Amino acid sequence: MQSYGVNELRKMFLEFFESKEHLAMKSFSLVPHNDKSLLLINSGMAPLKPYFTGQEIPPRTRVTTCQKCIRTGDIENVGKTARHGTFFEMLGNFSFGDYFKREAIAWSWEFLTEVVGLDADRLYPSVYEEDDEAFEIWNKEMGIPAERIFRFGKADNFWEHGSGPCGPCSEVYYDRGEKYGCGSPDCTVGCECDRYMEIWNNVFTQFDNDGNGHYSELEQKNIDTGMGLERLASVVQDVDSIFDVDTIKALRDHVCRLAGKTYGTEYDHDVSIRVITDHIRSVTFMISDGITPSNAGRGYVLRRLLRRACRHGRLLGIEGHFLTGLAETVIAGSKDGYPELEEKKDFILKIIAKEEEQFNKTIDQGLGILSDLIADMEKNGTTTLAGADAFKLYDTYGFPLDLTKEILEEKQLSVDEDGFKEAMEIQRKTAREAREVTNYMGADVTVYESIDPSVTSTFVGYDNLTYESEIIVLTSENELADALSDGDKGTVFVSETPFYATSGGQEADTGVIRTANGEFRVDDTIKLLGGKIGHVGQVVKGMVKVGDKATLEVNGEKRALSARNHSATHLLQKALRTVLGTHVEQAGSSVNEDRLRFDFTHFSALTDDEIRQVEKLVNESIARAYCVDIKNMPIEEAKKTGAQALFGEKYGDVVRVVNMGDYSIEFCGGTHVKNTSEIMALKIISETGVAAGVRRIEALTSAGLLKYYDALEAKLHDAAKQLKATPDNLGEKIAHMMAENKALHSEVDSLKSRMAQEAAGDLMDQVQDIAGVKLLAAELQNVDMNGLRDLGDQMKEKLGEGVVVLASANDGKVNLMVTATDGAMKQGAHAGNLIKAIAGCIGGGGGGRPNMAQAGGKNPAGIAEALAKAAEVLQGQIA
């Protein structure tokens, strides 16, 4: 068997499947695109999921790739054995509803035996125990004896992930010989030793799992295969592990030279050599895809790998910065398959050097403190490091919790992780509470304060909606960055920008920034100290990095609509000063593409007539189609033109003057229409007070106004439809209904009064004498409170002098009313106090004046008790 290098094998695989009509696609980025289920791409199939699920149409039904992958689930084991690694390349061929088992099996065998030249007698296929079809293909079509085909259960040879597409697998194992075996006489395929190595896996996606273990055949069956490139190379090159294959060995040897160590002579040294060799591969590839160090997400994975590599370098006695040199070896060994490594070499080395320098500044001090803490633990006989101590190492010296854990585990010690989390939360809470006064200006400390003060931006958007410039600074949400990749949020700074930043009441432009390798969606544009203009948003495709040439494209429609509303505020201010007086000054404004808001000084609400006059003047100015002339001029010259300045605003020696047909002349730095006719029309939709002496107008123009009228018209038609009328006769219909309603109300009131009187019957028969005061306490049926009050007045007239207590149950609720004459009150009666004393009987409460009180309750069964108690309470009042 001929020995092939990693780069040769990659090329051989892709060219083989190209000969089988597969499209050879470049490796996808390690950053998943529109896939929140993954932090990093961890398999050859992962970036192709949209093709398997049908969300996207594949460029061809047959595809082949060599995909860079990272898995960090068992990072603690990396280095401890020669099997584990975080970075690997996965060779794969895929069919999206095209070929199936027969072709997939035949081609895997052809490639391994005829192209690579592996000994067919040392290859052993496995199939799912129930997959007779695959067994037959291997046995009868490929000629593999039945005893060399292994049937395994679901755990080994069936791929599924919850509900959805799934299917059986067929793997190919290679017998590496007795020297790699465990020595057991029954050692065979499936043994845990290194003799029989699985090198290829064919997944036959043919079923759909409903989530309850019921499987149905898929109409479109797919093929998903995978073969680890490094693993194949270790077989072809007949070496112990992936750390011995040509490109990785070159890197491993570089580490050994730096450390002055020989690989394979001391276990602890080998662990560190393998950690550095693996981690620098991952780091180099991650940075090439725009991932930069941070304290969260992918950036944290990168930082963790970098710092582990740094620390293991120190364990080997490597002095100074060493990782950039190793990264150059990674690039040299892999640039044939991944030319982007060479293209982004300077960027990769810069990131690694910066992170290594930052960590080295604190690691010695941190290691010394951790060493002292460990000594104290051993002295005190404790085996668990306090969470607060672990947090101090993290917060002050940049030690990730994982690094502290790893160092402690080497000494059979542990850390209180819950205590660490508690300390972290206390710090976050403290930071939140102190945030309002965290810098000398009394403003929030933000990532922007870390930007070099010399950085500045020039706005070129008055005459351009698209412009090319260079990215000079990038930030993530909390730190400076050299790059942002797909899904990352942050801020882009360029030398010259067409994007208008929020100022002068005009809201910011939005749009997109494109580079050769990425696309950044601009959601906001902000002005910062020192003339900086920041484009805030998110990378939606690829990667953007410092130094990139970028095309900045403003959302033209939003800008145009905002400009119309902005220009309208100038006309509005002039109209207000004309109608209300020259005391009117602008007190604030807010303008966007949907509407305008204008605050102004005035001391009373506008009348309807004043609003109509203001609207009329603005719309006349729009109709006159004034040209909008904008000039920069010395401030003294500008003042001579009569230009209106914003009250309280500070201006420089040169100001921008916006002149609309000599009707409105104002100082203004915003964007405007070229002619007032573009505004179309203005409609004031509200006028309110917002502070003492300050009024606010909200208004619409152009597209916003048309939307408003469309919505209004829809409501009008809906109202007309509800009333079985048309918009033309809706007013007449409403007037008729109101008159009808008034007549019906009058009739209802008359009926209620009659019903109440009938319900009262001859109540005078129930009059009692309480210490010389007449008391009428009676229950009525289904009388509302209004009816009770009317009856109470009638009963008082009949009594002459006395107290009336009436109660009525209505729909499960109780109404209770008490009224007293002047004579009764002189003798001590008090309606309000009386009703308070008896309302509890009906499960409610109430009160009122001495002559009139009412209450409500929810217990009709208590009415009799309340009426009886009324006599007792009145007795007490009179006595």
Image: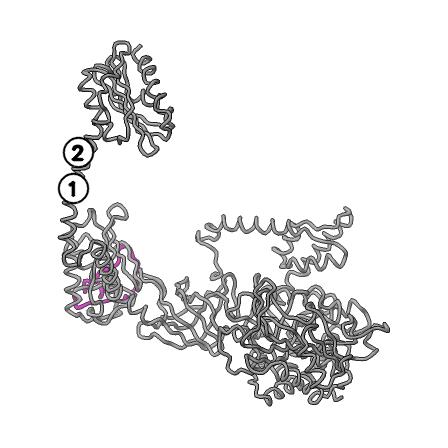
Q: Is residue 454 above or below residue 758?
A: below
Q: Is residue 875 left or right of residue 387?
A: left
Percent position of residue 486, x then y: 51, 70
Q: Nearer the viewer, residue 510 or 1?
A: 1
Q: Residues within 10 Å of mark 1 (few under 14, many from 20)?
A: few
Q: Is residue 362 left or right of residue 497?
A: right
Which residue type carries mark 2? Ser
- In this rendering, the label closer to the viewer, 1 or 2: 2
Q: Looking at the image, which residue is at 78% across and 79% down?
A: 147
Above or below, 523 relative to 326:
above
Q: Is residue 871 magenta?
A: no
Q: Position of residue 510 (x, y in %)?
A: 37, 68
Range shown magenta: 636-662
Under tag 2, what secondary structure? Answer: helix
* Left or right relative to 306: residue 542: left
Marking on residue 750: 2
Residue 638 lies in the magenta stretch? yes
Q: Residue at x 22, y 65 (%)?
A: 638
Position of residue 515 measured from the top left corner of the image (x, y, whole percent): 46, 77
Depth order, front residue of 814/532: 814
The tag on residue 742 is: 1
Q: Which mark is residue 536?
A: none
The kind of residue tagged 1 is Lys
